[in-house]
Amino acid sequence: MKRPKLPTAKKQKIPGASHGLNDFSHTLPIRLLRARQAAIAQFKPIYRQYDVTEQQWRVLRMVTSSGFLTAGELSQAVFISMPSLSRIMSSLEKRKLVRRKTDQKDLRKMTVSATSAGRAMVADAALWSDARYDDIARWFGKKRLGELQLLLDDLIQVLNTHK
C-alpha cells in the first residue's frame, strides 16, 4: 500500500536550521505538553493524598460529574485507551470507588458509575482542588486564564475541523 503524499507548505528559511523545521522546543505540540505537565504538577498532591494516578483521577472526576457512562464514552472523554481504562477500572473497583454494570438492553455494553465512596473522595478533594485553581488564576490572572481556556477551545475546534 502506497503512503499518501502530505501536502507541502511554504518553506521558511530559519536561521541555523538546516532541516527547515521550527526549533523542536517551540513547536505547538511540545508547548502544549509542557503546559499540561506544569498544570498536572499543581494537582499531584491530590493524587498522592488519595493514592491515585493522574489517569485514575481523571476517571473518577468524570464518573462523579457525569453519572452513568459507557466504557466507550468514558474512554473518549478522558483520553484513555480501552485496554488501559479496563486496568484502571479494575483497580478503582477493587477500592470500591467505581462500579461497572452490564447494560440490560445490550449485554456487550458496560456502564460505569461512581460509588458513594468515590463521590465522597472527589468531594473531599474538591476543596483542595478549588483552592489550587484559585491560586493558578491569581498567579496567571483570572482574565488571562479565561482567555487561554477560550483560545484552547477555539484551537481544538479549528484543528478538529481540519483533520
Image (cartoon, rainbow, N blue to C red):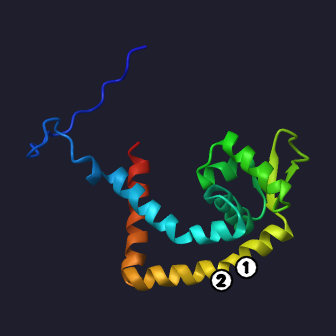
Q: Is residue 139 left or right of residue 48?
A: left
Q: Which residue is mark 2?
A: 127
Q: Nearer the viewer, residue 37 or 162?
A: 37
Binning the other alpha carbons within 10 Å of mark 1 as few (below 14), some (14 to 19) or many (20 upward) gives: few
Q: Position of residue 105 (x, y in %)?
A: 89, 45
122 relative position to 44: left or right? right
Crowd rating for badge 2 (residues with CA inside 10 Å; few <14, some 14–19, many 20+): few
For residue 17, which numbered disc appears in the image?
none
Question: In the picture provided, is 18 more to the left or to the right than 114?
Answer: left
Residue of label 1: 124
In the image, residue 141 above or below residue 156: below
Image point 41% across, 55% down: which residue?
Answer: 33
Q: Nearer the viewer, residue 111 or 36?
A: 36
Mark 2: amino acid: Leu
- Say whether residue 153 is visible: no
| Distance Cα–Cα, label 2 vs label 1 | 6 Å
Indicate the position of residue 81 as horizontal and vertical percent values: 63, 43
Q: Identify which amino acid the numbered label 1 is placed on.
A: Asp
Q: Indicate the quadrant containing the N terminus: top left, top right, bottom left or bottom right.
A: top left
